[in-house]
Amino acid sequence: MNSGIQASGQAAREVDAVVVGAGFSGMYMLHLLRQRGMSAVVFEAGDNVGGTWYWNRYPGARCDVESINYQYGFSDELQRNWNWTERYPTQPEIMKYMDYVADTLDLRRDIRFETRVTSAVYDEDSRRWTVSTNRGDVVSAQFCIMATGCLSAAQVPDIEGLKDFAGEWYHTGEWPHQGVDFTGKRVAVIGTGSSGVQAIPLIAEQASDLTVFQRTANFSLPAFNRPLQAGEHEAAKDSFLEERRKAEYTPAGANYPYNNQSALDVSRDEAFAELEKRWYEGGFAFLGAFNDIAVNLDSNALVSEFVRSKIAGVVNDPETAALLTPKDHPFGTKRLCLDTNYFETFNRPSVHLVNVRANPIERITPKGLVAGGKEYEFDAIVFATGFDAMTGALTRIDIRGEGGASLKDKWSAGPRCYLGLVSAGFPNMFTVTGPGSPSVLSVVIVAIEQHVEWIMECIDHMRAAGIETIDAEPDAENAWVQHVNDVANATLMPQANSWYMGANVPGKPRIFMPYVGGLDNYRRKCDAVAADGYEGFAFERERELAE
């Protein structure tokens, strides 16, 4: 687990590329760089590969993409020699898969574990990045590739009195690796997004008493998880690469059955019959029931009504059911959850629900917390409050581009990035699944592979042509940011106060960060940009040493 390059505390060697993060993005990026004979070092804050899955070990942590689709698609050998056990993989199984990949590709020898990047500074004279870490490493590289992930900067709310709490508190995104035993304890869970929806049922099974503090009721679909059978494995392996190539040019990066008609083109009974069928199939294929759920408020209202009826049919107490029923945003405009027995959990007499909008959390006390003027006593508090998504992992590093300009300052009014790949003024710094790309609105590993391969092909082009730097042209960046916003505004997505908009982080600008136009359209755009001589990017060729 702790193998890899050891931090020396001394000024380090020069390398061709520094990669920040050893999740799915960083591992694949390292693999391709080494294939090209380039020297690279990966810095990883954890003591193992895994990225977000290294940190998110909370009870019930599970991917909401089916396991057969949640693996690399660049190697037939990798997929044929790995067997998933369940329809949706758990966090421990995903970690085992990533260990398997790291071992098979011998990646750890170029990864510096338990090392957090603190700064990355571009030098205009040398045209190189100087990357520094909390362990004293200083590495110079031509390319700086940020594989920091979209959901990796945990967001702990700033609530008065937290330091005075006498019990234990946890964040789902920074869960203790030894696990937590809640048996017999009074527990509070704050937050009902994806992490909370997964954790609450399992915490409820252990805790003597569980109180859930909910600001916003969320739509959630049933996973209908189950073990995979041997025959399924073999059939999936034989068709995997072909299916992945198809998925790469679908809106979500998945071969869901898409119904190319409006929910308003059929009768209400017919629409509900289609939704019922997909509901019991489980998973996000539900979103493909009709082609206008994300853009037509009337169609969306029909789907919302159907899902609300399902919640009402599960939760016994009408008042609790009403609190758990989303009413303030259209279906799918906040991150959809996938659950196992989430709503059923609120039928337990030991589980209670507090509406934080009506009863705001005022402060943490030594014994618990005060909400709506009432003090609640707890032995443990769990913050399922999500992440400073899309940008937080980058802005928490002191990144300085041309003229010493700060990326954090440049993005203070919202992230600005051409194609989610390069931010103007920060030459040779690539962001994998950065803001302005489909990333979290698609099967993210498919989006990751597309970005990593595009970056590698771009670097190949530069090296073959004697080009030293690449930067985004400001006009191209501005046009892309405007396009990302225009596409989002043509949908219902901005109608929700979601983390897609930065709404869960106080003071963060409200701007829709991912690209909602579909992975297929985005991929074609990236392909066209490269084919057109990297339109919208500016290159500088290598200079003679005398200059």
Image (spheres, rainbow, N blue to C red):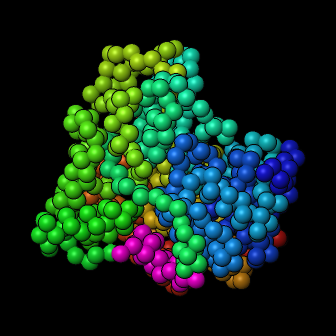
Say which quarter of the image contains residue 445: bottom right
Can residue 462 be seen? no
- Nearest to the observer: residue 395 or residue 68: 68
Write down the region rendered in magenta: 238-257
Q: Quadrant of the rendered structure where residue 509 is? A: top left
Rendered-image quadrant of the C terminus: bottom right
The image shows residue 357 at horizontal and vertical percentages of 29, 31
51 or 397: which is nearer to us?
51
Q: Residue at x 18, y 57 (%)?
A: 301
Above or below, 47 against 33 in this view is above
Q: Is residue 23 magenta?
A: no
- State the image coordinates of residue 174 (x, y, percent, origin top left): 60, 40
> Which of 205 and 310 lies nearest the eye of the viewer?
205
Query: Which image quarter: residue 216?
Result: top left
Query: In this view, which residue lies farthest toward the left?
Result: 267
Q: Is residue 489 left or right of residue 125?
A: left
The reply to whether residue 288 is visible in this rendering is yes
Q: Nearer the viewer, residue 274 or 375?
A: 274
> Which residue shows up at 41% across the image and 51% down it?
339
| Residue at left offset 28%, top offset 75% | 259
Residue 2 position, x and y percent, is: 81, 49
Q: Position of residue 398 (x, y in %)?
A: 63, 45
Give the number of marks.
0
